[in-house]
Amino acid sequence: MTATAQRPRLIRQDGREKVTGAGRYTADVVAAGQLHARFRYSDHARARILRIDTSRARELAGVLAIVTHEDVPDVLYGQMVKDRRLFAREEVRFDSDVIAAVAATTPEIAQAAAELIQVDYEPLEAVCDPELALEPGTPLIHERWASYEADETMERDGNVLGRSTIVRGDATAAMAGADVVVSSRYEADGAHGVPIEPRAVLAQWQGDRVTIWSSTQTPFAARSGVALTLGIPESHVRIIVPLLGGGFGSKCDFHFEAHVAALARKAGRPVRLVFSRREEFVAPDHRRESIAIELQTGARRDGTLVARRARLVLDAGAYCGEGGFFAQLAAMHAIGPYVIENVDIDSRLVYTNNQPSGSIRAPTAPQTCWAVEQHMDELAAALELDPVELRRRTLIEEGSESPTRQVFGPVGIRHTLERAAQMIGYGQPLPENEAIGVACGWWPSFGMPSGAYVKLNGDGTATIVTGAQENGSGAVMGLPLIAAQVLGMRPEDFSILCQDTDAGPYDSGSSGSQTTFNNGRAVAEAAGEVAQRLRELAAEQLEIDPLDLELAGGEVRVKGSPDRSVAISELAAADAEILGKGSGAVPEQPACSPDSGCLGRLGMESFLEPQLITHAVHVRVDPETGVVRVLRVAAAHDSGTIINPIGANGQVHGGVVMGIGQALTEGMALDGHGHQRNPHLLDYKLQTAADAPRIEIAWIETPAVNGGPNGSKGVGEPPSVPTPGAIANAIARATGRRVHRLPMTPERVWEAGR
Amino acid sequence: MKVEAILRINGVAVPVEIEPHWSLLRAVRDAVGLTGAKEGCDDSECGACMMLLDGEPVNSCSYLALQAQDREITTVEGLAAPGELSDLQSSFLEHGAVQCGFCTPGMLISATALLRRTQDPSEEEVRIALAGNLCRCTGYGAIVDAVLATAAGRAADSVP
Ligand code: FES
Ligand code: FES
């Protein structure tokens, strides 16, 4: 492998409590006297609410509180468009809109009471097909959409929640002049994040302040959501995240914390909500969006991409949630890491009466990449070029200009291509029904504000106090590596205090693969302040200029004569307040100058320090049954410098296997009326240990110029981006037929081959 | 109506009051107070709730607590003495087999049972033995490696 193999292998600090069963997740936390919460969900995907009668439910013994829209301020929330209430008031817009919440002494009583709540509806025809939702005459999902408070640049219009276009040059003329033009249409079903921990929330009031334990990936967003919807100051809300049992995006944003807090306030007792697996599937406003993708690309004989036209329709579901930026992100993925001379991309995010979409690990990317990379292979076939050769000729490199005229710095995408092809043995003869497929993809880094403190303890150890959130990936657990390097201490010398909004400074949470990238810089800066103070103190003792001192081996010592030194523990014991704080300057978004036809610019028209990926997979297809088996995966990634190899490798292994699931088995089966038919793990199938292949990883470490500590980028989301596309290309090579719908289930593979 | 029962967990007899319909998982978590075993689905689909019953792995979410009376129950908390780690637990940490950790208790129970049955499992045998335990974080590779390394370590130790 690469030099990363020599870097320290960090044993994560939360590991011991996790392997002994001592660690507490939110559903393990108990408050004395706590009640159990259950929700009454909407019974329809779209209906007007005529009456809500809670009287019979209230009479049930053991029920202490029932909350509806009447018990909370009438406030709309949502990140880029405020379009949702905590509790539905006049209308329900998807089948798990919350109408009421119950707190009772047992979960069974709470459930029985929720069922006793009488709701009268006027059912309305549900709009569940996003392309249909665009047709004139289709009912509006939000009749008052125009009155909502919203980001100005979203290009909203009726059922169109967001629209983004990327236009450069004259795609029509270029297409007409191309040697070869291919057109394709692909459709990706919705999918789920499926953390193995179903979410849980526990709320407890002390006077007018509330403490909420929540399995959230974004505690600060949860805090603002509670404050906004309950009409209380943010400072009265404290969010604590116990161990988090995975998220993959599905636990980003504010969710059910305020519902539970409202119940606890009304009941005068702590209240805990624990989701069932079914609820974890259907109720959050987070699932991977379905997308219909139409692509047309024109090329010259030598492979030069002269034009791309793309039309994308994304299912936003019933509410904006935090996914308002999806149209633009999908538009960028419809281009991909390629040089294309003229483009005309139109991407629309559309309201329907389906479950709301929200960020799931690299939102919009795996599906769009799956379509674009199949399309590239189709183009290669039309040009009679090998698919790897076509990519070799068209991928971006340092100095390439994007369709929005961003000029790229060093990018290792071509290296990832060559490396993945080499690792998988591209071109080798294979048995019948087996084939290798390749796909390339990209994902931006997100520069965001983030803070941390580093506090030196009297015994010479230190504590990192951070607002960052550990979702399981190990990103926060890896922060000591960064601080240790700055301070010349060992990673084991650091403890971590995190996941408490009253303790650490702001951070945007475990989203956008941003923890190392942003909080890493904050920790490095905080540690730098401590190092500075230590040098000053040691300089006094050693009577030398601080500039002549270095920190190493737990000491501050004179450069060049290491025996003149003071132990850090000695300095720490003598000074009670050695504290560093850092926020790290947020890297600027790279300059770009999109043509005037570009609409819906939300800041993603250029990609900050893109992470670049090639996956090559070897599959076997059973032509009788359509069953696809992934035999091997070679994953080559340029995520800049790798700081914590064990953590980074873990992200690739997990992300690739998630990508295999999305490729082959994981899809929401919708009934066309807004209900999911497979909200359980028996029919929504994750990959198991017996299904998952061996995965080989190569890190192409092109140091990021404008990036995280030591030239790092993020690593968490990209691994799931190109896997489905690579599998699709392998299937097409093995069978001679393309599968145009994701997931590529045995039935769909078999049908395509008929 | 709650009934009284005695559950033998990790070598200790614990009197409990439980509803007759409670699963073993619920009894152990809510009545005994051992929360190491997790509920991921309550439907025998994820394996996060696994415990050993007389040495055999079961999904405790789908097993009635009352049926577990008179049987030896082992949860993740009982895999090593307090303050210690079993070789398997250490191996999980060394191999990066733990990310969010929610599947870990069940994985450790499954793997413990496997290594009792088979001293020298092949990779294929490990993968099949763990197929009832879903993990969303690790892609399984590190977990499989951790189990194989534990088996190899035991084999090396038993050489005279
Ligand atoms: S909780 Fe028992 S198998 Fe999932
Ligand atoms: S470590 Fe998270 S589910 Fe396995």
Image (cartoon, rainbow, N blue to C red):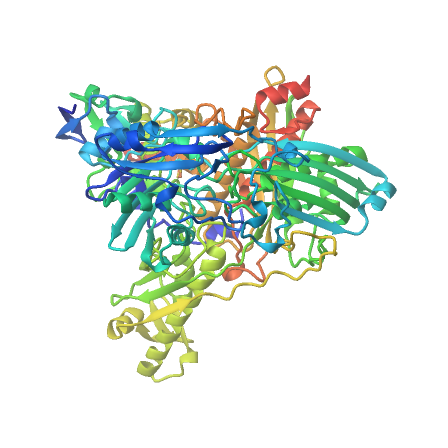
Q: Which residue is outermost to the bottom?
A: A543
Q: Quadrant for ligand 1?
A: top left
Looking at the image, residue A608 lies above or below residue A353? below
In which quarter of the view is residue A659 placed? top right
Q: Position of residue B137 (x, y in %)?
A: 44, 39
Q: Please state the total of marks drawn on the protein image.
A: 0
Determine the residue positioned at 32% across, 57% down: A236
- Residue farthest along the right direction in this orientation: A177
Give the camera-side residue of A271 and A533: A271
A133 left or right of A578 in image: right
**Closer to the camera in the image, A193 or A163:** A163
Q: Quadrant of residue A67?
A: top left
- Tell me if residue A28 can be seen: yes
Foreground pick, A640 / A751? A751
Which residue is painted at 66% across and 48% down in the image?
Answer: A164
For the C terminus of chain A, give its image quadrant. Answer: top right
Viewer-side residue, A633 vs A669 = A669
- Relative image position of residue A724 (x, y in whole percent): 59, 34
- In the rendering, at what x and y percent does residue A293 appear? 67, 36
Asked whether the viewer can see residue A242, the reply is: no
Q: Is residue A8 left or right of residue A145?
A: left
What residue is shown at x 65% (from left), y 19% (from top)?
Answer: A751
Relative vertical location of residue A559 with respect to residue A261 in this rendering, above or below: below
Residue drawn 40% across and 80% down?
A546
A184 over A603 or under it: above or below = above
Snapshot quadrant of residue A145: top right
